[in-house]
Amino acid sequence: MEVSETYLAVRWSTSRGRDTYGYNICSVTDQATSKRYSCNGGGYDMLGTSFEAWLTETYQDALRKIGDRAYMTYHETFDATRNDDGLYGMYRYADGRISLDGAYGIESMLKIAKTLGIGVRTTRDRKGHTTGYIVTSA
């Protein structure tokens, strides 16, 4: 089994667009594919949302396999007869597609990644700000 590793660079900037001028922008760039996943605005977990976009696109097939553990609301009941817990911020459609909502938080997205068997290590600058993620998968 071959282990692959990629780096997801995190970048924060400010929009200069006509309709979004002054909005915060959070981007996660996959260094292996050069694809960028970003969101703008504020008032929600933007880092979680950008990471979620990468995770959803890159691991959709693996997410489908754990789709039965999905739940979107904190008070939604989950099958307590099972030994594992649900994955907050994950939704399974009737056709089997999986959607993640990163606004539920980066920690929820990292838990989903861990459940998929993906190792994620956070890199930080001297001030403790997240600069990226080293992602390892088998």
Image: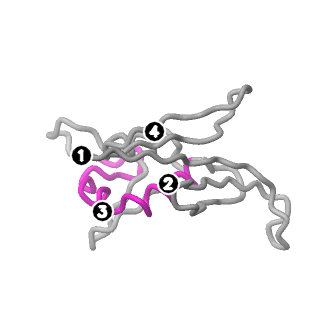
Nearer to me, 134 or 85: 134
- Tell me where residue 45 appears, x and y as whole percent: 60, 47
Residue at horizontal 40 percent and vertical 38 percent from the top = 119
Secondary structure character of the magenta stretch overall: helix
**Residue 52 disc label:** 2
What range is drawn magenta here? 48-77
**Label 4 Cα neighbours within 10 Å, binned few <14 / some 14-19 / many ≥20:** many
Counting residues from the start of the chain, the first of labels 2 and 3 encountered is 2
In this view of the protein, which residue sits in the foreground, 102 or 33?
A: 33
**Residue 5 left/right relative to 17:** left
Question: Is residue 69 left or right of 53 when viewed as pictured?
Answer: left
In front: label 2 or label 3: 3
Give the mark toward the camera: 4 or 2. Answer: 4
Determine whether 42 is above or below 95 in the image. above
Please state which of the two labelled residues, at mark 2 or mark 1, is closer to the viewer.
1
Q: Viewer-proximal residue, 65 or 93?
A: 65
- Residue 90 location (% of width, % of height): 39, 54
Instruction: Report how far apart the C-alphas of labels 2 and 1 lie in the structure.
Output: 26 Å
**Residue at image mark 4:** 120
In percent of width and height, residue 52 lies at 49, 54
Q: Residues within 10 Å of mark 2 (few under 14, many from 20)?
A: many
At x 27% / y 39%, what residue is drawn?
Answer: 85
Q: Residue 66: horizontal and vertical position, in percent?
A: 26, 53
Q: Name the amino acid, label 4.
A: Val
Badge 3 element: helix
The residue carrying mark 1 is 1
Identify the mark nearer the N-term, 2 or 1: 1
Q: CA distance from mark 4 to mark 1?
A: 18 Å
Q: Earlier in the sequence, mark 1 or mark 3?
A: 1
